[in-house]
Image (tube, rainbow, N blue to C red):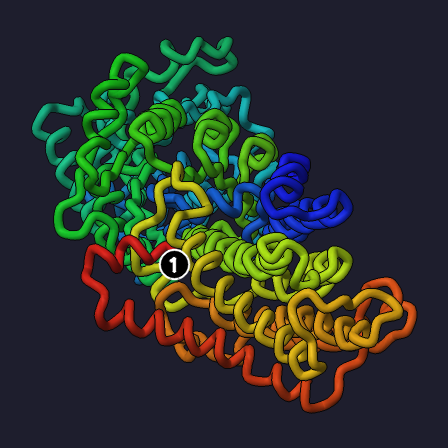
């Protein structure tokens, strides 16, 4: 394009070939934002570093921008919404119920001393079908649910020594997400015991008998319904409920296959656990709702437990969609899409990792930007499919962390919201320094247009080297500082921007080029002509080396250069908000910008008064009265834009306000 302007300048404006080349090079330098690439990269890097300090490790710089457009968060319950610190509350059998926390005197009582033998059998099963460890000093290792089961067993007086447990164990059937069961085969006196724990709706259908008052009797339909009602009662209180059962097998027999082993069980009872919501999650959920972000809860817990926790933290409002996902498989993909298409918040209970993947794919196919949490190996496909995969740093597996885009070092849902806010802040700040950089294209190009349109009668108000010094030197530090600007009030009070929306919008360009840019161009040229006319210059007078007006010309171009820098300072303050008053975020709240402006002024002084740079750039020292002429420039630029924003806030029609909001 620059080369194309050479003949235009020669034949259209009557410039010499040399001046035409100067004109074209000036247009090229004025229209290329040389500082934009490093400024964007550094702004994203700074955001990533700030998020790391707040508990979110972002693995890709571009993910920060994606976070800002996230409109759906698919979150786990345990450890993300809750504290993941299970504590046992009650042990229940068909004959009795014991509130564990409220009866500390029963701790370490021998099982045989219990009035209900089923409680002793329940505690023994909880201790045997377990891989966690409780240390004498109170420390524990293992899954929090299994730790809670050990605490319950200990309270009921059962030996929980891990070495003894492993010595008697002959086989283990690992937890299966589809079955929602885990079983162990343990040696006993004269026979072996198969101990099973899992979701009540998975354990109960495999039971044919129940232990009551020390006797094993058939489990009839009425007893099944009673157990189911009790499970629902516990779950509706937000408690996690596990059922335990056992079966006697011949001593020393070869472990049967799983289907053969986990049948004809004897139901022992239930153990309930409480995992309270994190205190900060309620406010985080409320912020999501204000920001137009939809929350989808995906958990393996009972539907009523999930619904109770969701209600406690504010997910779903008064009427969330509650879905039991246990029956979902790849044949139900359209059903999942239909459930999610309504726009309401959904609770998927008894969900498997495959369900997570289906949800991520369905939401993305509907055009949503999805953040998906996960911690297990099987969660990796869903984490990879989501726009932002969020792995747990404490409880997550290496596979989940590797598949994710972001890792939460505190496993906290509120940290996701902090990251989304940071994404919006970074995106807004990128737009700020894009406007800041683009606003100076107009004052950089206008001097060359004036020179060309005057046919050379008006000497070039700004040299190419001065333009480059302005572009690369004085502009870079304030641009970087704008990338550290605090978030504008109300940023989390409007819906996320569409992911397909370009970062540069027409109102931004209008504001940058035709409002701020024209203003700075007019002010800088006013300083140029002020110095030239004061020196007695008239159009067409020679200003080259050896002519009387040459020094005045050097001072005039310096005045243009400094006028652009002064306007640049006003622009930096003006672009810090889109519609709000600068007072709402604080005129002096960005200390990095204040430092950058000081550094910019010092650099400008070096450009103007250092003899080597005077020779290189064609600058000259200015007297104090010329420098005083520049003092109002920043206030004029900032003040004019402040008036424009005041008018938009108070007088622009609602439709027009939406149109100009992007500016």
Which residue occupies 76% across, 77% down? 552
Q: Is residue 164 shown left or right of residue 148?
A: right
Q: Is residue 205 shown left or right of residue 536?
A: left
> Which quarter shows the N terminus?
top right
> Which quarter shows the C terminus?
bottom left
Query: From where the camera sits, is residue 110 visible?
Result: no
Residue 318, above or below 466: above
**Residue occupying the far left of the picture:** 222
- The residue carrying mark 1 is 278
Residue 651, above or below 356: below
Residue 576, how many percent across, how many down? Answer: 48, 67
**Residue occupying the far bottom of the picture:** 625
Determine the image quadrant of residue 471: bottom right
Q: Is residue 85 shown left or right of residue 14?
A: left
Q: Is residue 649 shown left or right of residue 23?
A: left
Which residue occupies 81% across, 72% down? 550
Residue 321, how many percent across, how many down? Answer: 17, 38
Residue 66, how many percent across, how many down? Answer: 47, 42
Which residue occupies 22% across, 38% down? 303
Query: From where the camera sits, is residue 402 visible?
Result: yes
Which residue occupies 67% across, 79% down? 531
Residue 562, how many percent across, how many down? Answer: 68, 73
Foreground pick, 296 / 539: 539
**Residue occupying the far right of the picture:** 612
């Amino acid at each position: 394009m620059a080369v194309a302007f050479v003949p235009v300048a020669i034949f259209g404006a009557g410039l010499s070939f040399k001046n035409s080349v100067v004109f074209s090079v000036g247009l090229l330098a004025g229209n290329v934002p040389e500082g934009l690439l490093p400024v964007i990269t550094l702004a994203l890097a700074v955001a990533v570093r700030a998020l790391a300090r707040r508990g979110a490790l972002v693995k890709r710089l571009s993910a920060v921008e994606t976070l800002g457009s996230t409109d759906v968060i698919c979150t786990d319950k345990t450890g993300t919404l809750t504290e993941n610190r299970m504590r046992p509350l009650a042990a229940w059998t068909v004959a009795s119920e014991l509130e564990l926390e409220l009866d500390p005197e029963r701790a370490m009582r021998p099982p045989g001393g219990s009035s209900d033998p089923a409680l002793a059998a329940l505690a023994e099963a909880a201790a045997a079908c377990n891989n966690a460890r409780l240390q004498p000093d109170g420390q524990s290792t293992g899954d929090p649910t299994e730790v809670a089961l050990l605490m319950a067993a200990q309270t009921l007086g059962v030996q929980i020594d891990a070495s003894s447990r492993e010595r008697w164990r002959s086989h283990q059937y690992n937890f299966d997400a589809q079955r929602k069961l885990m079983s162990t085969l343990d040696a006993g006196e004269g026979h072996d015991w198969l101990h099973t724990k899992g979701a009540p709706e998975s354990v109960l259908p495999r039971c044919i008998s129940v232990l009551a008052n020390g006797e094993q009797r058939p489990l009839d339909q009425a007893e099944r319904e009673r157990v189911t009602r009790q499970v629902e009662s516990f779950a509706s209180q937000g408690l996690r409920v596990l059922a335990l059962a056992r079966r006697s097998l011949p001593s020393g027999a070869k472990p049967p296959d799983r289907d053969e082993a986990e049948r004809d069980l004897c139901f022992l009872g239930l153990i309930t656990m409480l995992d309270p919501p994190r205190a900060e999650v309620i406010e985080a959920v409320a912020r999501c709702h204000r920001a137009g972000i939809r929350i989808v809860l995906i958990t393996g817990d009972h539907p009523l437990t999930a619904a109770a926790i969701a209600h406690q933290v504010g997910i779903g409002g008064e009427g969330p969609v509650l879905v039991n996902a246990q029956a979902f498989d790849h044949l139900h993909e359209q059903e999942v899409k239909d459930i999610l298409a309504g726009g309401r918040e959904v609770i998927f209970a008894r969900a498997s990792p495959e369900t997570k993947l289906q949800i991520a794919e369905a939401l993305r196919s509907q055009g949503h930007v999805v953040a998906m949490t996960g911690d297990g190996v099987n969660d990796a496909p869903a984490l990879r499919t989501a726009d932002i995969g969020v792995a747990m740093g404490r409880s997550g597996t290496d596979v989940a962390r590797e598949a994710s885009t972001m890792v939460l070092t505190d496993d906290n849902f509120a940290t996701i919201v902090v990251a989304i806010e940071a994404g919006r802040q970074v995106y807004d700040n990128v737009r700020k320094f894009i406007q800041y950089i683009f606003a100076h294209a107009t004052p950089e190009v206008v001097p060359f247009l004036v020179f060309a349109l005057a046919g050379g009668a008006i000497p070039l108000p700004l040299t190419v080297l001065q333009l480059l010094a302005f572009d690369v030197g004085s502009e870079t530090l304030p641009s970087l500082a704008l990338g550290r600007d605090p978030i504008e009030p109300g940023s989390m009070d409007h819906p996320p921007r569409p992911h397909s929306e370009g970062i540069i919008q027409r109102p931004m360009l209008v504001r940058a080029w035709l409002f701020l840019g024209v203003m700075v161009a007019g002010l800088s040229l006013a300083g140029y002509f002020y110095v030239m006319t004061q020196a007695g210059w008239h159009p067409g007078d020679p200003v080259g080396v050896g002519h009387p007006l040459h020094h005045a010309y050097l001072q005039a171009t310096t005045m243009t250069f400094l006028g652009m820098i002064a306007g640049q300072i006003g622009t930096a303050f003006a672009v810090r908000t889109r519609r709000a008053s600068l007072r709402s975020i604080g005129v002096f709240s960005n200390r990095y910008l204040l430092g950058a402006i000081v550094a910019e002024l010092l650099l400008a002084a070096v450009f103007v008064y250092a003899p080597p740079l005077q020779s290189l750039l064609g600058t000259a020292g200015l007297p104090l009265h010329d420098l005083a002429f520049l003092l109002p420039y920043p206030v004029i630029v900032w003040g004019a834009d402040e008036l424009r924003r005041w008018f938009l806030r108070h007088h622009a029609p609602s439709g027009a306000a939406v149109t100009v909001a992007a500016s």
